[in-house]
Image: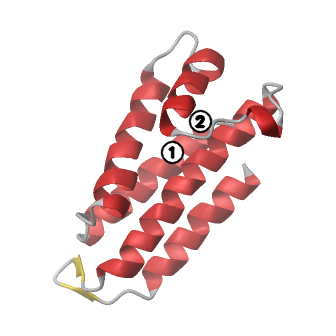
Amino acid sequence: MKEAIRYLNNAKEILKSVPIEDNTYTDVKPVREALGTAYLAVLEAIDEALIKKGLSEKELPTSVDAYRKALQKYLVVHDGRLLREFESLYRVIHIAGYYRKLLDRVDIVKDALKAAKAFIEKMK
């Protein structure tokens, strides 16, 4: 999970430079960039876990639907919680944070990064 953790650390570094006022990031662009990087960390963790399961680089997922299917097939055979966590991270970090630029509260962004880290740890 070395690469996934590297991405997550990069996301945290990006956030360090963002001005905060009243528990709100005042510049949404770097927050959006950090959350996009955190989502990539989640995908990297899944990729690394799939490679450990024997998939080749060419067989790795290339869309969110393909990630869902790969999680179901290779990583959550008996436990759907991991898939639910992925869905939550996808909606919060990627859609709300990166795509729609809806996250600007410091506590919410930090909680999202903690959730991403917890997910990455489960991929080990």
As drawn, which residue projects farthest toward the left?
A: 22
Left or right of residue 56, residue 21 in this image: left
Seen in the picture, residue 121 relative to 77 is either above or below; the reply is below
Residue 116 locus on image (x, y percent): 48, 50
Query: The residue under label 2 is which amino acid type?
Result: Lys
Question: For residue 33, which numbered disc appears in the image?
Answer: none
Judged from the image, the secondary structure of the residue bearing numbered disc 2 is helix
Quarter in which the C terminus is drawn: top right
In the rendered image, residue 33, in percent from the top left (x then y), is placed at 45, 72
Residue 39 pos. (x, y %): 50, 54
- Which residue is tagged 2? 122
Q: Is residue 121 left or right of residue 35?
A: right
Q: Residue at x 73, y 41 (%)?
A: 48
Residue 89 in the image: above or below residue 107: above
Image coloring type:
secondary structure
Cα–Cα gap, marks 2 and 1: 6 Å
The residue that appears at 32% across and 50% down in the rendered structure is 92
**Secondary element at tag 1:** helix
- Amino acid type of the residue tagged 1 in the rendering: Ala
Residue 52 against residue 31 in the figure, above or below: above
Estimate how packed mark 2 is, as few (under 14), some (14 to 19) or many (20 or more) residues with alpha carbons within 10 Å: few
Q: Residue at x 62, y 63 (%)?
A: 7
Indicate the quadrant where residue 22 lies: bottom left
The answer to which quarter of the image holds residue 113 is: bottom left
Q: Which residue is mark 1?
A: 118
The residue most toward the top is 78
Assess whether mark 1 and mark 2 are in contact (beta carbons under 8 angstroms).
yes
Nearer-the-camera pick, 26 or 32: 32
